Amino acid sequence: MATSLRAVAGVVLAAGLSRRFKGNKLLGSVAGEPMIRRVVAAALASSLSSVVVVLGHESERLRQALAPLADPRLNIVVNPSYAEGQSTTVVAGLKALPDNIPAVMFLMGDQPLIEPAIIDRLIESHAADGICHPLVAGRLRNPVIFARRFFPDILALTGDTGARAIIAANPEAVSTVDYGREAPFMDVDSNDELGRLAPPPVSPFVLIKGAGEMASAVAWRLHQANIRKICMLELEKPLAVRRAVSFCNALESGTMVVEGVTARLVESAEGVRESWAGGEIALALSRHWAAFDLKPEVVVDAILAKRNLGTRRDEAPLVVALGPGFAAGEDCHIVVETNRGHNLGRLIEDGSAEPNTGIPGAISGHQADRVLRAPAIGTFSSDRAIGDSVAAGEIVGEIGGQAVLAGIDGVLRGLLRPGTEIAAGRKLGDIDPRGRPEYCTTISDKARAIAGSVLEAVMRHANRGLAG
């Protein structure tokens, strides 16, 4: 298993002559910036403890291309013997590392689509005394991690062999991490390849905890932004009120559509992949998740329990939590403010969201009186449906032998599923005084705002280090 996300240093090999390329390929433009800068930026945006870049051919031009990347972890060195083969660059990079580094990752300067999340997953997966490679379509690819015990063998390399001979001589020490995408591992060897190169769509694997109104809005917005690898987790008996816009309804019907986006209930990792292949969001029971053995790149806690029910910052390279009960920098990386007002949707990277006020947001001047709450503990029953019109004082349902009464005139925008057991004082539903039934089946303004902030956090993470 992983040692630590800070236990690996990086060496970017960028000294070659680019013999098959007209010009210096490492200076070739990819998405508007030099190829070498993209690779080094991705390395710096990852959890590598330090990054050494080994230059050789046209070193000054490459150094200038890297100038915008000011980072104390970055060390640029020059290999004067680069023409004698790749081994000299590998050795120069290893010698430039601090003495106490327990492992090194060698990255290629001509892999411009490599991603920080890929680097972090390799770091997390490598064995303390082994060699770790990405595996794509049955082929070993770069970058590769070597534990410290292989450093003497690396320092003894000669010629243009790189470290392949060490890998071949130690098959028992090699572990692999399987990736389903080829594009991030592509290396550029020719001008034609560079001309055809385009960054793949940013589509990290996002795990969303919860499948109620807010979680569903987050999933919907990410899906609309073409982030298509989304899995949601929910309890067997969710307490969602706005069920017409909550993907948790798929727990009963198998599928649920919210504003044209479908979520499908799955029971296995294969089911998750099949739902993605069909352009759908995967929904699973929380108790099944551990058996799936999947590693998300982003985790979003959208349960809105007003407290942390177990989310940890080490669950993924990016962990986002909605609302109070979390501290950015401690149990997550980013907290999203969910309280209505000036700061709604603000991304908090240090500290917590505003505390829960217990006061519902106002709609047409109504706050607490628009919310239906359980007058007693028991099983909720009702013959009313979301979208029904109700009048103040009208019976909406019953729980524990007591009637649940509408506080205002309006439309039932949300209602707990009948047959659900619930504690006294918990929310059973809400009434929209605007009287617009179509609002019941569409995502609310608050949910859209918060979902947009989660999308911002995901994109900020995915593109970190790539701004020129």
Image (tube, rainbow, N blue to C red):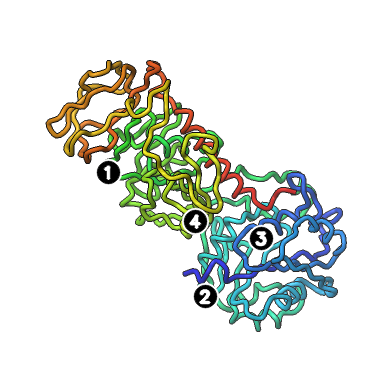
Residue 256 picture location, percent across and down = 37, 32
Residue at the image point whose x is 59% and y is 50% from the top: 461
From the image, state whether disc 1 or disc 2 is nearer to you.
Answer: 1
Q: Quadrant of residue 373?
A: top left
Instruction: Tell me if 345 is positioned left or right of 216 in this view.
Output: right
Q: CA distance from mark 4 to mark 2?
A: 20 Å
Mark 4: which amino acid? Ala
Residue annotated with mark 2 = 128
Distance from Cα at disc 3 to Cα at disc 2? 20 Å
Circle 1 is placed at which residue position? Answer: 236
Q: Which residue is mark 3?
A: 43
Height in image: 50 above or below 254?
below
Cα separation between marks 4 and 3: 17 Å
Circle 4 — which element? loop
The CA span between labels 1 and 2 is: 39 Å
Name the residue tied to disc 4.
316
Mark positioned earlier in the residue sequence (1 or 3): 3
Q: Closest to the observer: 192 or 408?
A: 408
Task: Point out the tag, 4 or 3, that comes first from the N-terminus.
Answer: 3
Place of residue 367 in the rendered image (x, y in percent of width and height, measured from the top left): 37, 28
Give whichever of discs 1 and 2 has the lower sequence position: 2
- Residue at 77% x, 48% y: name it: 33
